Image (cartoon, coloured by chain):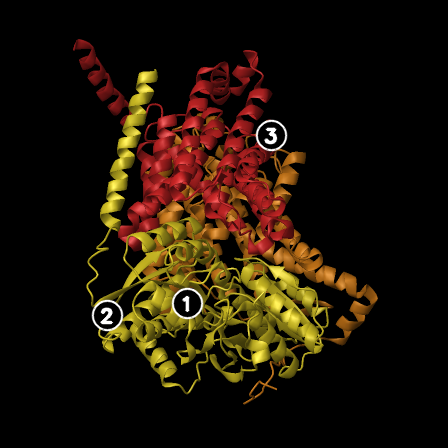
Amino acid sequence: MSVRKREFDLYVEGRYRSCTTGLALSYSLGAESTVFLQQMVNGITIGSLYSLVALGLTMVYGIMRVLDIANAGAYTLGAYLGVLAYARTHSIIIALLAGAGGAAITGYLFQRAIYTPIKKMADPIVPLVASIGLFIVMEDLFRLIAGPYTITFPVHLPLNRLTLGPVVITGTQAVILLISAFLFLLLWILLNKTKIGLAWQATAQDTETAMAMGINTRSVVAFAFILGYIFAALAGILVAIHYNAVFPTMGDIPSYKMLAIVVLGGLGNPLGAVVASIVVGLAEAFVAGYIGSFLPTDAIAFLALIILLLVRPQGLLASGGEVR
Amino acid sequence: MDEKIKKWLLLVSLFTIALLMTACGSGSGNGQSSAAKTIKIGFFAPETGPEAADGTSAYNAAKLAVEQINAGGGINGAKLELVNYDDQLDTKQAVSIAQKLTTKDGVVAVVSGSYSGPTRAAAPIFQQAKMPMISAYAVHPAIPRTGDYIFQLGLSGIVEGAAAAEVAKNELHAKNVAILAIDNDFGHTLVQGFTQRAGQIGLKVQEPNWFHFGDTEFTPVLTKIKNSGADVLFMPAYAAEGSQIIRRIHDMGLKIQPLGTEGLDSTTQFLEVAGKDANGLVIVTDFNRDSKEQVVKDFIKAYKERYGHEPDMVAASTYDAFYVLAEAVRKSGTTPDKIREGIASIKDFQAVSKINGFDGIRQANKPVAVQQVKDGTFRYFGEITDPTIITPPVN
Amino acid sequence: MNYWAVLATTVGIWVLLALSLNIITGEAGQPNIGHAAFFGIGAYTSAVLNTKYGVDFWGALVMALAAGALMGAVLGLISMRLRNDFLAITTIGLNFVTVAIFQTVPYFGGAMGIGGIQPPRIGGLTFGPVELAVLSWLVVALVVILNRHLQRAWFGYALRAIRDDEAAAAAMGIDVRRYKVLAFVIGTGIAGLAGSIYAHFMTFISAGDFGFNISVTILAMVVLGGRGSIPGVLLGGVILGMAPEVFRFISDYRLLVFGSILVLVMRFFPSGLLGQGSRLQELLAGAFRREGAGVRVR
């Protein structure tokens, strides 16, 4: 034997819990359905994370009809500002505020300096290319300022693993589900109970009528960008805590995957974006769990999108998207 | 109408020429000025773009190696000079860089600090120009097979996988191994080595599960593995994905022993992210941080002092590539042909890793270090030196 | 010399891709942010035929063109059903799914890629960098000539009518369906051709060479240069194609500069550097007119 052994201690994880009711339930349900339920939970959690980022993009798209790749830059910006504030203060609240504040300013500046002036051009490809440029600039600035290596975001979440019958919900999963639910509620209240939120809805549905009715579209557009970027930043912080990692290219995958989700949801429809996120999350979980990775995860979201669009060209939930 | 088009075309071509001249002015450097006392070594790595972290580590190690060799008096009195390029992990750029290095920069040898794609694209150009290239850590088996000027210093993926199978069977006493591997050349080569060896030594291995570069959510696939009855998880992965796999294993309370590879061999990118959850993890790599060799201790100390963090496998391998080159120059001479002969004839050379030598198709033969994470650091766990395991296949 | 030849070949391939996308996006006004898929389909067709079935470069080149065009026809038919942003995102999806297939299916080399692709040959001459550069720019010239003819033919007017107002074009009796699909077929066919040249130039390809970032770069070339303008797109392709080499002297800031160029050009020249109504275009056109007048006096 060629392995020279010095010490040996195996990886033992002593905190594994399983309760008798859980075992009984799993027998009555059968192992298959237990795994099924577990994958449901996994998929919904993944979907909730996606929906937070997708909502930011939807806010912007709904009002501006701009596919704003740079929104994923706000996601990374939020994470960096959050981790910076957390390292100084050890307060998660201040971290969230710092990320949201930085993103709000960025969103406002981008809208005033770049998107609104360009948007006067009819072709939607122009703001798209500009947003790709902004995203590249942001990513490279993060690398130049913070360095190429991963920074950790060591927040200890207070929840332990929950065992509901045969299904295990990990602490991070629970936190993600709770915070997402809270943010959805917050957004729902903002959009339905505040003047500016109602104005957003009116403008998203029909800009011209909204203007005719005396809605100040300028402030609504600013509101959409600020809120959209804040949502991206909060999602960035949450994801960074979830993965304990902040790095310059963390926005790469969200930058395009969110486009698929936002379209699946019917471009500019917040509820649709949430539903589509969960659908994609579930699809990814079940494909990984049952079929194995026959295709890269990114391709799954897009495959779902292509199939759906061929059947329902207006997206999952029809809305203000440009429909034939 | 036609006249206008012609003028536009003229304008465009003028512009092109202007651009070309700019490129020329910046790129031509001082190809002929290499005084007798400097030896120019070419280098490329993905220093910006999607793998900037590894590229930066490689470049940092390259600078450190060149400085240290020069500080120690150079090679037979001549100083080394680094000609550095950033390939942004783009094969097209790697081809341009290779052309520039072989025709314009006056270098005598090249080190690739890049991944398999750019390295493999550049290799034929170096081969054709008869310029020796050492690939520091790229694993694609086609790289050294390009020709007699192309050397692969990193562990062969097949060897690394076979060594992992050996560790799983004899040290971790695996009964049933699950595999979760990255779906690229690195993952596939390691899985191939692992399953081949496992077949020879009678180790039960399940069908591999693949994930993709940039994946972050592993709960679903780990749920599947949890129900498969596996007791060891072989995971050829890079740091970003690997750290998340380890974190989820812990979150879900999986009772499984993870067994990683050199892709996890990074403090900043892996250990800090995985945190406490990494304790107990065993990896196969070629960087033994607990080595008693002075060169290893010096390297770790100097790197930390200079760059403020622990060196990783990428840095160690790149550093070694320069020391192998320096040794070849010292022994054989400074022309590309002499350097090629020098590299090919290297035997029992102790750099950060120990290089037994290069085989007939220029793959390094070196022992496999087995490390275990304890209290947040990689520690010695074992070393595999058995020639039947560590000799890379030549077909 | 070889360095310049390699650079010229790379830029030539980029320019081909930009010109081909311009027919779809610039002239017919159909968004396509997944053009690299067709580039990849051409490259893989050529590589598979050459390495597995011994077809030489010239045969593989024709098949790559056909494969690109065929897949383009499919996308053209999809574009009947989807419009604007929906179509744009479907093309992104097409790019990801295509790359995923190349990456996963062992027939296409899977994760290891395809190596050992033969360089082109004529008689006893094996193409080196210089011959490849000449070849790729010859193809560019052919495409420019073809494109000019198409622009002037009925086809060009039909495309521009569709781009400006699809409903109006249909009302005028233009067969929108036919011209749209044709624009896709021609554009993606040329992209397939570019893919074939790329495969035999690099001699080794893998799925990552045809990713979404490549599509974005091609689109940026078209939009930066000026949608619909052949000189503009040539310029865009040359600028962005050479950028990685030209900007080497600012090493660490290359991506920053690349991104800034995109933002600034879009902000201040939204129709592209030489696009219709761009300030630069007007300025230069004015200069040319004056010069032209001078010639006439003499």
The answer for how far apart the CA atoms under marks 2 and 1 are is 52 Å
The answer for how far apart the CA atoms under marks 3 and 2 are is 60 Å
Question: To which chain does the residue with label 2 belong?
Answer: B
Specify whether B351 is left or right of C25: left
Check chain identity for marks 1 and 3: say if they share one.
Answer: no
Colour yellow, chain? B
Q: Quadrant of the N terminus of chain B?
A: top left
Q: Amino acid at mark 3?
A: Ala
Specify whether A21 is left or right of B323: right
Is the residue A286 above or below the residue C135 in the image?
Answer: below
Q: Which residue is mark 3?
A: C73
Q: Colour of chain A?
A: orange
Q: Which residue is mark 1?
A: A91
Q: Quadrant of the C terminus of chain B?
A: bottom right
The answer for how far apart the CA atoms under marks 1 and 3 are is 56 Å
Nearer to us: label 3 or label 2: 2
What secondary structure is found at the residue carrying circle 1? loop
Check chain identity for marks 2 and 1: say if they share one.
Answer: no
> Could you say where residue A223 lies in the image, as x and y percent from the top left?
42, 42
Q: Amino acid at mark 1?
A: Ser
| Dot 2 and dot 1 residues touching (CB under 8 Å) | no
Q: Which residue is mark 2?
A: B79
Q: Amino acid at mark 2?
A: Lys
**What residue is at 22 percent from the left and 46 percent from the top?**
B25
Is the residue C188 above or below the residue B315 in the image?
Answer: above
Pick the residue in front: A186 or A32.
A32
What secondary structure is found at the residue carrying circle 3? helix
